Each structure stands twice: as C-alpha cells, then as structure tokens.
Amino acid sequence: MSEYNTLSRTEVSVGDKLPPVAIDITTGLVVCGALATRDFEPVHHDKSAAQATGLPDVFMNILTSQGLMTRYATDWSGPEAIVRSLDIRLGAPNIPGMVMTITGEVKAKDEQTGIVDIEVLGENNIWGMHMQGTVQLELPTEA
Amino acid sequence: MTPEEQQAFEEKIYAYVGRQVCPPTPARDDVNATMIRHWTEVMGDTNPAYTDAQWAASSRRGKTIAPPAMLYVWNQEGFAVTTGRSSDPQTDMVELFNEHGFTGVLGTNVKQEYFREVSPGDTVVIEMVIDQISERKATARGAGYFFETLATFTNQDGEKIGTQRFRVLKFIPQEQPAAAASEDKLEVPTRIASPRGHDNKWWWDACDEGKVLIQRCTNCQTLRHPPRPMCGECQSMEWDSIESGLDGEILSFTELHHPKIPGYPYPLVCAVIRLGEGTNLVANVVGCEPADIQIGMRVQGRVEQVDEKTMLPQFYPA
C-alpha cells in the first residue's frame, strides 16, 4: 500500500528479531504522555508529588508505556497489521534523564490466523527492566 | 495484625470481589481525531492508520482507527483526579487497604485484548468490576494482596471491542520511602566496585594500571590466585608477584541472561580462564558471539576500561 509496507504472514518467522529502538525519557515525554492519555495523577506531572513518594522526579504512566510498546511492534510490522492484545508486566519506573532501549523477538506464529506473538522488553539504562510483555499482531496475507 | 484481625480484615476486602466499580458508562467524548493526533505526536507513532485519512481511505480498513492502546484513555476521569478520585467501590476498597497499613501501591500487570477496532465517531462504553483479590502474599516489597480489575469495553452498538485486566499490589511498605530531595541526580550505574581489602587491594591497584599480576611464593615459587596471605604448598607468608601475559584457555563459562543488572553490557559471558602461567582467572569473554564460545578455546586478554570507573581484564578469541 503506497509507501507504507506491511509485513505479510509469510514474511515473518519465529525467532525474527525486531530492530532495537532507544527512547530518551524526557520530562516532556513523561508529562505530555500522561496528558495525552488523560492521566492527570499528580505523580506524572508534578515533581514534588513524585518526590513525596520517594522517587527523584516525575515518572512515566502505564498508558504511555503501553503506547510505546504497541508503537514499537507496529513500526516494525507496518500499518495493516491489527493489534490483537497487549500483555505487559511493569518493572522499574522511567524517569527523565534515562534512556529506555526496546528490543523484541517473534516468539510464536499461528499459520492459520496470521497472529504472531512478539515478546518485547523495554529496559532503562539506570534501573533496568521497565516493561516486559507480549504484543500480538495479526498480519495480513500477501497484499 | 493478629490472625483474628487478619481474618476480620480479609472478610471485609473479599466482600469487594465481584463488585461493580462502574456500570456501563459511555465516554464523555466520542473517539476523535484530535485526541488521536495528540496521542500519536507524543508517542512518536507515525502509523498512517491513525492519522492519515487519505491513506486510510485506500487501506484495507477504509478509514482511520484509534490506536488500540488508547482503549482505556477515552473513559479516563480527567483533571479532577489532581484533587483526589471520586468515591466508588474500588477507591473505597483501596481506602480500606490503606487504613490497615497496606499503603503501598504498585501497578504490576496490564493485559488488554482488542476484538474490534474503533474509529472517530464511535463511542467507547466502559464497565468495570473488581474481579479478583489474591490471598495474602509475601512479596519483595512487603506483605500484601494483589487485586485485579476487569474492564469490558463496548461500542455504541453494544459490540464488544475489548477488555482490560489491571493487576495492582497493595502492600505494607517495609519502610516508608523518604521523600527524595530535589537536587537528587540520576547517576548512570557502573559495574559493582571491586571490594579491596588488606589482602587483595594491591591486585586491583595493578589492574587499574593495566596489569594482571599473579602472586608468587618467594619461598617455593608456587603461583596462586586469587590473592591470599599464605602459600598453600609451604605455608610461607612471603610473596611477590609476576605479570601475566594474559594468554589463556577457557576451562568453563556461563552466559548471564536474567536478571539484567544495570551497568553491565549484554550479552554477558563470564569464564574461568586457565592462564599460560598456570593459575585460573574469572573474567569476561568479549569480542565474539556467545554461541561461538567453547570450552578449550584459546583466548587473549587485555586490561581495558569497561566503564567510567572500572578497569578489568577482558578476553578475546585468540
């Protein structure tokens, strides 16, 4: 479809690795991510509220982590893939100044439905695992 | 908490299992291009299925869709939460936990399933129940209970569009977190510092200068490593040292996968290396894929700076 290519189910195999992506965790990303997901909890935009919980700064809200995880999967697959599920386990907070590196690997593929399980790991450079889980994508048959 | 108190408390919290947090409630705003654009800009998501109407018109879907991960966004309470959430069975239950010392809160898992994509103009209707509360668990954070809410999402036609399971740990904090100071700075971690005591400081100091030394008994000339005060052969406590040429052979090795420790590069391979001088040294093998490493492989070491604070011998395939 025009300049946007989508992987078809025959082009993907178990064991395929997704290219790693490094994301700078900035105050802008944390605060604007919280607002874009309508999460107005003070710990995501008010540094003093976050510090009262023992963390040094505002921290990323879960809905932003979910957004970044699905974006990572569909950036790889292309826009005709259908996201079927997102299963995410949360680890250490993402705080401004950190860099989160996301990696992923195709762990399963259903030949009938074209649904692939992509195991995704997001680790920050200070505290380690921030998010870990599986994104299921339904890939199209040949275009 | 005595066993009787715990039982009384658990009777109260388990009464919340199955309680409806909210009846089917339509989002105040329909799915709309403005909120989608705001979201995609911040997430850096350039997927044309979300924002490129022209592309979407000629795609398999025929129209733009909302990002699936926005499923829960449409029904969020909004700015009012900055001054506290309004009362519902979930907030009441959380308050009950807090009153009994389970003040810690940690979102641990979210699972969303998507059955049907939604597009601008659709209405997302949410219904939520408290689905499960675990038995009391001992966790690394402290004693606590996991509770799980189940949200079901439907559209304006009553068709199911998705579900969300959200699991939260409510726990008794082992210690109250001290408020962080505003000048606290994040420090990029380095490797764990080598412990330097009376008997081994000299070895690490030499490593800092780029040399791997091997202790030698001056009485019987036996080499030994790691450093220690007495010769195992003749019990002499007199010693000097020689510098290793760092040529060696891998006796054994392991690859560390989990948990990943910040400050260490991965893949991370630790090996026991028999040095040409005859003593063994534990060190990293680098410069090749872990799959290519074998017992018996010849390696050559170099003392290198591996992070801002650390010098270590690193071994490469010879």
Image: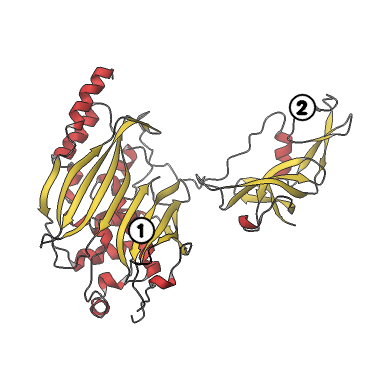
Q: Nearest to the eye among marks 2 and 1: give it.
A: 1
Residue at left offset 35%, top offset 69% = A139
Q: Position of residue B280 (x, y in %)?
A: 75, 41
The disc at residue A135 is: 1
Q: Position of residue B71 (x, y in %)?
A: 23, 57
Q: Is residue B245 visible?
A: yes
**Quarter placement of the C terminus of chain B:** bottom right
Out of B265 and A107, give the one closest to the viewer.
Answer: A107
- Percent across and percent down for residue A91 are 39, 45
Is residue B291 left or right of B28 when viewed as pictured? Answer: right
Q: Is residue B232 above or below residue B168?
A: above
Q: Which residue, given by chain and number where applicable, does mark 2 sit on?
A: B229
Subunit bearing disc 1: A
Q: CA distance from mark 2 to mark 1?
A: 56 Å
Amino acid found under the numbered disc labelled 2: Pro
* Quarter residue B190 falls in: top right
Judge from the rendering whether residue A108 lies leftward or rightward of residue B239; answer left or right. Answer: left
Q: Position of residue B162 (x, y in %)?
A: 22, 57
Camera-side residue: B43 or B168? B168
Mark 1 surroundings within 10 Å by alpha-carbon count, few (fewer than 14), some (14 through 19), many (20 or more)? many
Q: Which residue: 38% across, 73% down?
A: A8
Label 2 resides on the chain identified as B
**Does residue A22 lie above or below A56 as drawn?**
below
Local packing at callout 2 (Cα closer than 10 Å; few below 14, some 14-19, many 20+) is some
| Colour mode of the rendering | secondary structure
Q: Secondary structure at mark 2?
A: loop
Q: Is residue B246 above or below residue B241?
A: below
